Image (cartoon, helix red, strand yellow):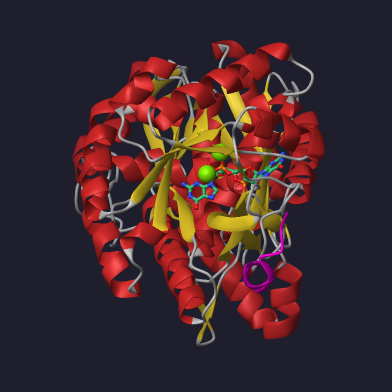
Amino acid sequence: MAIPNADSVMREESQIFTYISKLVKDPERFSNRIQALYASPHSESHDIVELQDGRFLEGRSRPQQMHDQIIGRVWSLQDVTERQLTEARIRYQASHDLLTNLPNRMMFSDRLSDALFQATQNRSLLAVMFLDLDRFKLINDSLGHAAGDQLLQEVAQRLKDCLRESDMVARWAGDEFTLLLTNLYGIEDATKIAQKILAALRLDYQLEGRTLHVSSSIGIAIYPADGEDGETLLKNADAALYRAKDGGRNGYSFYTSTLNSEATEWLTLENHLHYALERQELMLYYQPQVDVVTGKVIQMEALLRWQHPDIGIVAPGRFIPIAEENGLIVPIGEWVLRTACAQNFAWQSAGLPPVRVGVNLSARQIREPNLLETIERVLQETELHPRYLELEITETIVMKNVDRTCMILDELHQMGVSTAMDDFGTGYSSLGYLKKFPFHTLKIDQSFVRDLNTDPNDKAIVAAIVAMGKVLNLQLVAEGVETQAQKHSLLSLDCEVMQGYLFSRPLPIEAATQLLADQSIK
Ligand code: C2E
Ligand code: MG
Ligand code: MG
């Protein structure tokens, strides 16, 4: 664009301004500025305006005086695009990380001070997060720096995609990033964003023709609880990051310890559980039920174990609630059923004395509409005779789903599958309730067995359960039998089938097979 020559083309100032206002990016602001100038004839001005085509125009103006009279204004207009862009580039470079194009440490600290000022004014919450990639050094060392750089760029992009307009992410150093979340309604907002970030960063990366999995950890400090100035918040978020790493990788941790441990563990396990089935990390242990009078094993209960690559063996009490919550229990439960039935069929085919296999069902499985079809299909596929399968449902689950359980029990009965009420005595059902449910077996909860010889109440309760069970023609099994004294008391109460450490702990396959082969338990 040629800047119009006021002398030759348009002599009137107003014509020039009309012309320029058509070119500028923000015409309204421009005309307000001009009007303000004319309203105060003595003032001087110096403005830089941006044009629609990206160029910048510097305008200076001062009043023209003659004999103390203002007779007009002197204007100078200059195209300063080059200079503006250079300055902007320098400013950008000083405040950004050039690899990821994220704000750098300095800009983050500036924005943090501003945000803290705002938060103090508005009495609002603010979160500072420290994030780093787990095992980044390993990737860098093994795949090379170019791959490491590419990974950091991809991570930066995913981080930006997770944040809201008002949030900020910066590259702090190396594989460390800092995040600033403003206007939080509660701590849960920070939790949600942390979870979202961890999930986004966990997705596969394609680097140099390979698929890579990278996990990360996050430490969180909240203003005002964990610090009132930027430095303290950053320091505490960093401390929380170390705690997140201690609690297993791919988790987040708050500086305030009470908010911590459970959420972190839950998240770590939940993340890994998604892969557990496909990576074949799940396995079944088997624990015998013994008829103490004959010394024979009559049943093996399948108990789920998770061989976690970092943590080791995880007990079902820690991860089944998670699997219940996220629905993974359905495929996992089917896997348990199929594996246990196939194993039992294999034992029988190997000529071992036939026993039933016990499989636990969870609440979510009970509510699955096609549970019965699944059971039927698994039995067909594994060729196990239905009478060698017993399904265990805890009393608590039964009581929460009375009608549905009754229906399922009836159907199973017709299919020839045996059923047990597990952990009896821990729920709220009365003995009389037992009549309602067509179970074959009643498993007396270990809490009664534990205190059998010390608490006369427990002895009376077990005696009543046994008596009632016999009347209803139920098979009674006492769980958690650990001592000879407990065994004798149970025998004296006419309970003959027992399960517990006294006879055997839950065993991996080879040991369970050996035990069945020996059959020498007394
Ligand atoms: P449960 O069905 O009542 O299983 C008995 C639990 O008591 C097992 O714990 C077993 O290892 C433990 N136990 C056995 N004998 C003794 C003893 O003498 N003393 C003590 N203190 N404990 C004993 P585990 O394997 O940790 O399983 C806990 C619960 O997890 C099970 O309770 C069951 O409700 C659930 N579970 C296990 N496997 C599965 C599964 O495949 N699916 C579902 N849905 N739930 C499962
Ligand atoms: Mg059980
Ligand atoms: Mg039980």
Estimate the x, y position of residue 237 in percent, counting from the top left.
73, 38
Estimate the x, y position of residue 422 in percent, counting from the top left.
49, 36
Inspect the magenta stretch and tell me whether residue 396 lies in it: no
Residue toward you, 158 or 343: 343
104 sits to left or right of 416: right
Estimate the x, y position of residue 59 in percent, counting from the top left.
42, 43
Residues drawn in magenta = 510-522
Estimate the x, y position of residue 99 in percent, counting from the top left.
61, 67
Q: In which of the image's four quarters is ligand 1 placed? A: top right
Residue 122 occupies which quadrant of the picture? top right
Residue toward you, 214 or 472: 472
Residue at image point 64% right, 63% down:
307
Residue at image point 36% right, 49% down:
418
Mainly helix, strand or loop, the magenta region? helix
Residue 291 in view: yes
Relative to 511, residue 51 above or below: above
Quadrant, the C terminus: bottom right
Residue 50 in view: no
Residue 145 occupies which quadrant of the picture? bottom right
Relative to 373, residue 34 above or below: above
175 sits to left or right of 366: right
121 sits to left or right of 40: right
